[in-house]
Amino acid sequence: MSRPLSSSLLSWLRCFDAAALHCSFTLAASELHITQSAVSQQVKHLEDWLGRPLFHRTPRMLTLTREGVRLHAVVSETLQTLETTLEQLRRRPSQEEITLNCSPSFAMRWLTPRIGEFLRDHPELSLRIYGEFHALDRAQMTQRQIEAGIRFDRGGYTDVRATEFLEEWLMPVASPAFLADHPGIRAPADLPHALLLHDMSPWEGASDNEEWDHWLTGAGVTPPEKHEGQRFNLSQLAIGAAVSGQGIAMGRLSLVLDDLISGRLIDVFNLHVRSAAAYRFVTQPAARDETMLIEAWLRRESGVFRAECQEWVRAQRCTQIG
C-alpha cells in the first residue's frame, strides 16, 4: 500500500509552512537554513502536485490564496501538535515542571515579554509554553499532560476549571503609510472590504469574519454579506500584514498596544468594541499549587496592563462600546 505522505511531500509542506508564516521565501529560507531558491522550488513542487497555486506572487509581496490559507491552517496546527508530542515524549517532567498550552498570538505578543520576571521570582519552577488554540477538555488535558492553558474564547467549559483574567477590546488598525495612501477612510462606512485583513480562527468554532462583523455591528455599520481581503489563521499574522502596509487588521488591544504606542500601527477610528471573547486560564479541577501561582500572577499582571490600557485610551480620547 502506498503512503501518501512521502518524505518529499513532507519536505514540501515544511517549506510551505515557513513561507506562509513569514509571507516570504527569503525569510523562510533563513528559518530553514536553506537557499531562497530551494524554498521556492519546494513550494512549486507542492503546487504542481496539488494542481493549484497556494500563493499570489507579486514583485512586492507574497500572499496566500484561499486554498493556501486553508492548507496552512491545517499544516501549522499539525506541526505544532507533532512538535509538542515529541517534546513531551523526549523529556520526563520534574515535579516542578509545568506545561502551559497557550493561544499562539497571545503567547508571542503578551505573555512571553512579561513572564520572565515571574520566573526569576520562582527559580524552582520550569515552565514549558506551547502555542496552540484548539479547545481544551479534561480528557485531552489528561492524555497530553497539559497542566494549564490560556485560551481566548467565549467560555462554556464544562469539565475543567476556566477563570477569566483579561477582557479584550477590538479596533481596526493600519500602518501610517497605508492610511496616508488611503485618505478617504474617515468613518467605519468608508472601510474598503477588499483591504480588510482577517483572523479566520480567533477561537475554535468562530466564523471567518467573527471579529470584523462584531466590531462593525458595534460601530453601527451593517456587515457585508460577503467579506473580501486576506485571511490568516493567527491574529499575529494579520497584525504583521497590517504593519507591513497590506491592509487594515482587526486589532486586539492586548496584542497591539505596543505597536500603537510606538507608532507602527494607528488606531484608525479610536472606536473600541468589547470582544465577545476573553482570555481564560484553564486547569484541571484539582491543580497543583505551582500552577495556581501562575494564575495569581496572571491576575496581577493583567490588572497592571488594564490600567496601562485605560491610561492610553483616555489620552487618545477613544470611545469604548460594551
Image (tube, rainbow, N blue to C red):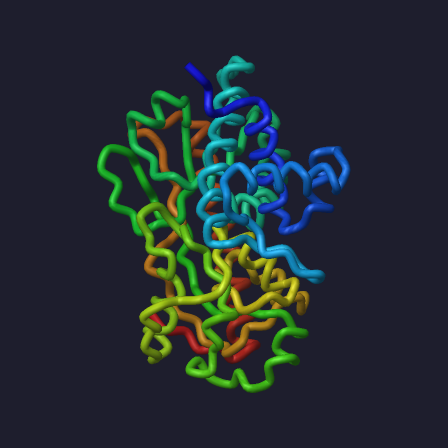
Residue that appears at 34% across and 44% down? 163
**How far across and how far down the image is residue 74, in percent?**
45, 39
> Is residue 272 rendered to the left or right of residue 24?
left
Residue at the far left in the pictured view: 158
- Quarter of the image for residue 322 reads bottom left
Residue that appears at 54% across and 21% down? 87
Closest to the observer: 303 or 218?
A: 218
**How far across and how far down the image is residue 176, in percent?**
65, 74
Closest to the observer: 11 or 198?
A: 11
**How far across and how far down the image is residue 1, in percent?**
41, 14
> Is residue 93 rendered to the left or right of residue 113?
left
- Quarter of the image for residue 34 reads top right
> Is residue 54 rendered to the left or right of residue 218?
right
Can residue 311 be seen in this snapshot? no
**How far across and how far down the image is residue 224, in percent?**
35, 73
Can residue 152 be seen in this snapshot? yes
Closest to the observer: 168 or 237?
A: 237
Q: Is residue 49 above or below residue 2?
A: below
